[in-house]
Structure formats: C-alpha cells, structure tokens
Image (cartoon, rainbow, N blue to C red):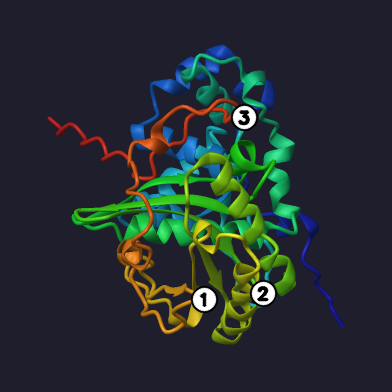
Amino acid sequence: MITNPTPQRALRGHRPQRPATTTAASSAYTAHLATRLTGRDRWLVHMLHEHRVLTTHQITEMAWPSERAANLRLLRLYRWRVIDRFQPFVTYGSAPMHYVLDVAGATLLAREHGLEPRELDYQHDRALGIAHSLHLAHTVGTNTFFTALIAHARPTGRLTAWWSESRCARLFGDIARPDAYGLWQSDTTTVEWFLEFDFGTERLDRVAAKLPRYARLAATTGITTPVLMWTPNPRREAHLRHVLAQALTALDDPTLVPVATINADACSGAPDKDRWHPLDIHHPGLNHFRLGELPYAWPYLSPVNPLRPDAPHTGAGLPPPSPIPPSPTPRSPRR
C-alpha cells in the first residue's frame, strides 16, 4: 500500500521562463535579440526554416565541437524563443531533443531578408506540429543523411548544396517530388542527385513508379540528375533493384534516370565514402562507387555546373542556406 504518494507538483520539472508570443514577435524584442546572436545562430535559424526539424546530434555534428557546447547554446536560444523543442516518445531509452523554428527566430529571419513576418508563411503551431507527424522519422532520417555528409566534409570534398523536400516540391512538384536534393563537390568531380530515402514502408511498385516522373523532369528541364536510393537492409535493396530495373526497361530512354542504391548495412557512417551500386540494365555487374566517383559510372552525363544551385529560383521562397556553417566568432580575450 502507498502511504506517502508523490504530490502532483513534484512531478513537474523546471521549465525555463520564455517571453510570450506577442513579445517574441515584437520589433523591440527582435532588435534587442539581433545583437545577441552569432553568425552560427543565424545559420541554424535558416537551416531549421529550410529543413523543418533537426536533432541535438545532427546540430552538434554539423556545427558544434561537442554535444555539451551545443546544448548550452541551444538552451539559450530556446529561452529566447529563437527555437522551440520537443522530445518524441520511444519505447526504450529516450529520444534526442528535436528542434524547430520558434516565433522570434522566424521574425529575425524575415527581417534579415526584408520581409514582413507574415510573408515568411510561418506558423508556430504548424512548425511544432511535426512532432505529431507520421513523417517525422522519415524527415529526420533524410536530414541525418545530409548532416553526416556535412560532418565528414574533407579538404578534398564537401557538400555545397542541400535542398529540402519542401523546396524540391515548390520547384519540381508538378512532375516529381524527391525527398531532397544535394550536390557534392570535390577537387576532380562534382555530382548532384535527388535522394529517395526508403524506410521500407512504401510498396516497391510505388517506388518504381517514380522513375517515369524523373525521366519526364529530365526531359522537361534538359538536366539529367541521378537518383540515389537509400534502403534499410540488403534484402530490401535487392528487391527494389529488381523492380527498378523493370521500370527502367519500360522507359523510352533509361539514360534520363541514372539510379544508384545503397542499404543501411553497407553504410560506413561517412556517406561520402560509402559504396553506391549503380543500376545499369545493360551492365548489371557494374562496380560500386563512392559518392564522388559516381560521375564515372555515367560518363554520358554533362558536367555539373556547381554554381547552378545558388541561382535564384522563382517561387522557391528564401534562397537555400549554405550547408556549411560559418566559423565560430572568436571571443575577445578578457582583460
């Protein structure tokens, strides 16, 4: 029998005090806050607007030297209402904190681009609503692929463009809807691709049905862009490659859709070093390639113009942020 039950008030943890929504969106608060944000803070605001949600691990991997340093800064940005956060429920253990854009961050972002906050098409409830979305795991998985690329950038190669699913939908959504777009640039090659992040929950025939749309997109734009497909295990990859080969055979010109696949078991944790397996219906025994080597698998492709992703695009909203965070501002020495 419980003789001394825990009072309800003892079950509540400490919640940091934060300004009200109207205060956080005011011009006076925005002006005050602008003097306290670093270039890295502003970069994170832009990244959260572009990619919707980023976890503590992803943010640390991209831009902070340690998770402790990241948590200290993220807590401060949370208290200022630059960002908001939630922690999904998991059956075992605990999920990392997930961060989204908050009211003050959205207002700052709009002002930086000469816009009224309402022109940014931002709503706090909608931003935080991804916590209950059935696509949360898919979005986080897609973002993890790219944050790992940023973290493993080397002097000889780096990710120079990363567009979100929503940006791709605005640009190409009437024809194809990739999960993301990326561009990797090295000393010798430049490769761009559309990513299809496959969790194994979608029917194989529906995944294969996307190839004719990519073929139509290539024919319409005159730009042939490879499609990289990430799968959760070798069995799924083998089955997927079978149906994709049938879909490619049915195309009038299969060269319009260069395809390469990989599975999670074959990933080394550094996507630029992972061995991608191109799908060639005429040469099924094609070797595996690293990300930067994929252009050698499709020698008929035109060279990629690395400046193209930075060009403005009508109807695409704000320009895409650079995937590479700015260098931390050095602190002034104490006197």
Query: Of the residues shown, which amino acid type is indicated by label 1?
Result: Ile
Seen in the picture, residue 180 relative to 40 is either above or below; the reply is below
Using the image as rendered, state which of residue 232 and residue 261 is in the foreground: 261
Q: Residue under circle 3?
A: 103
**Residue at the spot 54% in from the left edge and 18% down from the top edge:** 29
The location of residue 145, given as percent across then percent down, is 47, 62
**Residue at the spot 26% in from the left edge and 40% down from the top edge:** 327
Direction from residue 94 to residue 130 in the image, left or right: right
> Residue 281 shows which numbered tag?
1
- Dot 2: what SS? loop
The Cα–Cα distance between marks 2 and 1, rounded to whole angstroms, is 23 Å
The location of residue 224, given as percent across then percent down, is 47, 51
Q: Say which label, 2 or 1, has the lower sequence index.
A: 2
Using the image as rendered, state which of residue 9 and residue 263 is in the foreground: 263
Direction from residue 65 to residue 83 in the image, left or right: right
Using the image as rendered, state which of residue 209 and residue 56 is in the foreground: 209
Q: Say which label, 3 or 1, has the lower sequence index.
A: 3
Tell me if label 3 and label 2 are in contact, CB under 8 Å: no
For the N terminus, the image quarter is bottom right
Tell me if label 2 and label 1 are in contact, CB under 8 Å: no
Q: Residues within 10 Å of mark 1 (few under 14, many from 20)?
A: some
Query: Of the residues shown, which amino acid type is indicated by label 3?
Result: Val
Report if residue 16 is visible in the image: no
**Residue at the spot 66% in from the left edge and 68% down from the top edge:** 250
Q: Nearer the viewer, mark 3 or mark 2?
A: 2
Seen in the picture, residue 17 relative to 27 is either above or below; the reply is below
Q: Residue under circle 2?
A: 200
- Dot 3: what SS? helix
